[in-house]
Image (cartoon, helix red, strand yellow):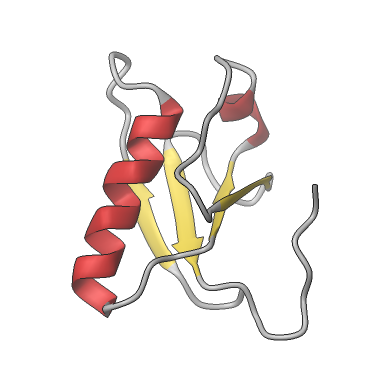
């Protein structure tokens, strides 16, 4: 993914799964399709167990700042990592 939507949410009361869901719903309303990939800072994955919205792969990436989500569509020809 080279192009995506950057989402900021630093609410300490909201878990990461909910943040991803809220960002994905907004993404779908804005762009007309559901994102299938979300990059987050690795520190965000350590906080709590994660149950991401169905169909969205979560990947750690140090380029993404803490409290930010980078959502988009996986590029054609790439396979999801498990």
Q: Say which quarter of the image contains residue 16.
A: top left
Q: Position of residue 27 (x, y in %)?
A: 29, 64
Q: Is 2 placed left or right of 82 in the picture?
A: left
Q: Is 51 placed left or right of 35 in the picture?
A: right
Give the mark count. 0
Q: Residue furthest left?
A: 29
Q: Is 11 placed left or right of 65 in the picture?
A: left
Image point 45% across, 48% down: which residue? 69
Image point 49% across, 48% down: which residue? 54
Q: Residue furthest bottom?
A: 76
Q: Say which quarter of the image contains residue 47.
A: top right
User: Which image quarter holds the N terminus?
Assistant: bottom right
Image point 32% across, 16% down: which residue? 12
Q: Is residue 7 above or below residue 14?
A: below
Q: Is residue 11 above or below residue 40?
A: above
Q: Position of residue 73 (x, y in %)?
A: 52, 73
């Amino acid at each position: 993914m080279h192009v995506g939507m950057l989402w900021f949410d630093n609410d300490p009361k909201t878990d990461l799964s909910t943040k991803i869901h809220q960002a994905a719903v907004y993404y779908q309303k804005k762009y007309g399709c559901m994102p299938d990939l979300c990059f987050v800072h690795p520190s965000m994955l350590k906080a709590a167990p994660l149950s991401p919205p169905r169909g969205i792969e979560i990947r750690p990436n140090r380029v993404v700042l803490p409290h930010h989500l980078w959502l988009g569509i996986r590029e054609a020809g790439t396979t999801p990592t498990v």
